Image: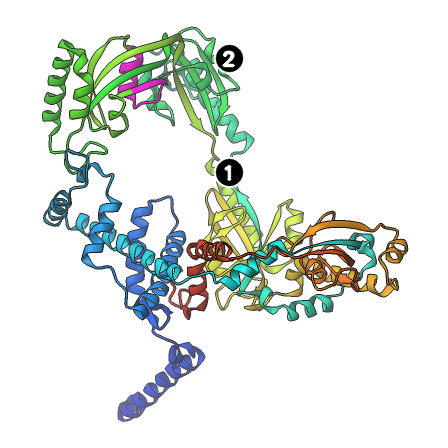
Amino acid sequence: MAVLNKIRQRSLFLIIIIALALFSFVLADLFKNSDALASKSQNIVATINGKDITREDFMQKVEAAQRQAGPNATNTQVMNRVWDQEVRRAVMQTQYDELGISVEKDQMRDLLKTSLATSPEFLNEAGLFDENKLNEYIANLKETSQQAYASWVNYEKSVAANGLQQNYFNLVKAGLTGTLAEGKLEHQLEGNKVDIKYVQVSYASIKDTLVEVSKSDISNYINKNKKEYEVEASRDIKFVQFNEVASVEDENAIKADLNVYLNGRFVDETGRKDTIVAFSKVKDNEDYININSDIKFDKRFVFKSSLPAAVADTIYSLEEGGVYGPYKDNNHFKISKVIAVKQIPDSVKVRHILIPFVGARSATPEVTQTEAEAKVTADSLLTVIKSDRSKFPELVKEFSSDQGSVEKEGRYDWHPYNTMVSEFNDFEFEGKTGDLGVVKTIFGFHIIEIEGQKDKVKAIQVGTIARKIEPSETTTAKIFRDASNFEIKAGEGDFEALAKEGSYTVRPVNGIKVLDENIPGIGNQRPIVRWAFEEDAEVGAVKRFNIPNGYVIAQLVAKNKAGLMSVEDATAKVLPLVRKEKKAKMIRDRVSAKTLEDLAAAESTTVRSASAVNMKSPTISGAGREPLVVGAAFGLKEGETSKLIDGENGVYMVQVTKVTPAVELDSYQAAANRVEQQKINVVNSKLYNALKEAAEIEDNRVETQVQ
């Protein structure tokens, strides 16, 4: 009790002590993470030429882009795409602001007119763009759907951005000229020619094994050519993969299960009455298949060419009601039954009129008819056509929404079975030439006329009970245990030795960048990349990751800092270059000859000739592209012999035998025009990259966890 009284008396003192302790903890964390004091707000994804891109704005654009891209595009792919777009927008906007250029209202209308010139909803009766229809369309969007209107606004922004960029590019192109002096130089580079004699001492004359290249040689080369060997921070990993695949026992169990449907069952192995009618005796094939198969029934008839190649002959030759299987196909075990046999045309020719309705696929905003109204229209047109088939072409032009066939009078020329959607396909292939009818599909109501059918051949309707080949729970549990045991043991011992002991393949992956997402061999594995770049992830660390249908056990092998490429990583690229330099020195050191003939004799080679060599295309006949050698030749006088020259493919000695100057022209304007055109041609491909390289870009995607 006395102790409690003392604590109460000193409560203020204790509160102060606790507060100071918490304050010191916060300060320590701030100093430990100095970026929290010094760096920009965590809300800034990037700063480009002094302008910030906020995290909120960036992520909104990513979400919109993800919706547009659909499920097949990964989040990282979409982010990178948006990043490239935002960088481009910011870099170009800097130029627009400096020049004070923009897209005004009149130009915007012209841009939209050009962009939408072929869109049928904005054309008048004469087939010309109608601005009033565009205005009406925009007003309708604004009133009926804010989301659709927002999409339109984004489209307008995109059109404006493209127009603004084109304006800028045109300004740059307008400022490019080819001067007469440049034209004269262009003419001389191509027209000045020399004939030469030369001796090439090929680098291949010295075996690679005779040239010693040390790590210090490679390091020195890297340091002399730093710009070529600068690299981003990267990580090296290695991994072992554990795939969840069906065992032999699993496959046998699947086949045994299918055999029950093949043979039927009346009493199971436990004595329980559990009747299963044999597939061959079933009457309602569709229900039977849909209940028992992993793949639903497809009622279409097929030709032999559409059957799995390995079993096509067998299944195609079955009588109606015949069953074959189990057989393996496309990661399934299957048993197949020939349900029906008929003769079907190999190809048909039809014409049609498509009447869409609100909600039909590909229906444009101008479509106002309900399904019932569209059906009435289609039936009315069918009546007119039945009374006078010659009216079909004009009715196509007036009523059909299928723009792909309107210009062909609604016709789809000879095409094979299963080309069209199922309802359309059934009508054209199961009817006969001359048949007319109305068919409903996901696109609307079609008035179809069968104009011709060719080569009827045997087709079969195949019913298939399929079971996917996948591991059982027992197998997946074993794979999980194996992966977990490997993870634990690898974290304690030798990764490579453990993999060898278990007969697992170790796959190394080097040079992973912080924003990468694909790991060769296992595809999109962003979590592995994030783990490898965590600050507290130590070299040698091991971790298990889930992948589709299995696991990966990864080990962090190396953390490579940004800067110059390491000797080990650069060796493959640098070694041949250093070796070539050393071979050139070895050749120089052993050569004392001063003439071509003496050099050729000493090196057991010949003196060769090359005619009409020019600087525009510095290629030597018999030696290949050798710009340094050609340049040296143009520095010699007629009859003069060079010293040794280190070329691309060997060491050379050159003698100029004839100098032919370019023909003097009265005017070099034509050549100057060519130079100007050459400059203009590279604007579209190189201008942006040059502006981007010169821009100040601060990339904070990793720091803001936008990755």
Magenta region, residue range = 412-430
Which element type, helix, strand or loop, lies under badge 1? helix
| Quarter of image, res 37 | bottom left
Within the magenta stretch, is there residue 429?
Answer: yes
Residue carrying label 1: 475
Residue in the foreground of this view, choosing between 110 and 453: 110
Which element type, helix, strand or loop, lies under badge 2? helix
Toward the front, the furthest residue is 666
Label 1 or label 2, whichever lies nearer to me, is: 2
Q: Where does the N terminus fall, quadrant-wise? A: bottom left
Q: Where does the C terminus fall, quadrant-wise? A: bottom left
Amino acid beneath label 1:
Thr
Residue carrying label 2: 313
| Quarter of image, res 457 | top left
Residue in the foreground of this view, choosing between 83 and 182: 182
Q: What residue is at 37 percent from the left and 71 percent from the top?
A: 49
First of labels 1, 2 by sequence position: 2
The answer to whether any part of residue 287 appears in the image is: no
The answer to whether any part of residue 4 appears in the image is: yes
Q: What is the x, y in percent for residue 505?
A: 62, 46
| Quarter of image, res 79 | bottom left
Q: Residues within 10 Å of mark 1 (few under 14, many from 20)?
A: some
Amino acid beneath label 2:
Asp
Q: Is residue 670 above or below residue 690?
A: above
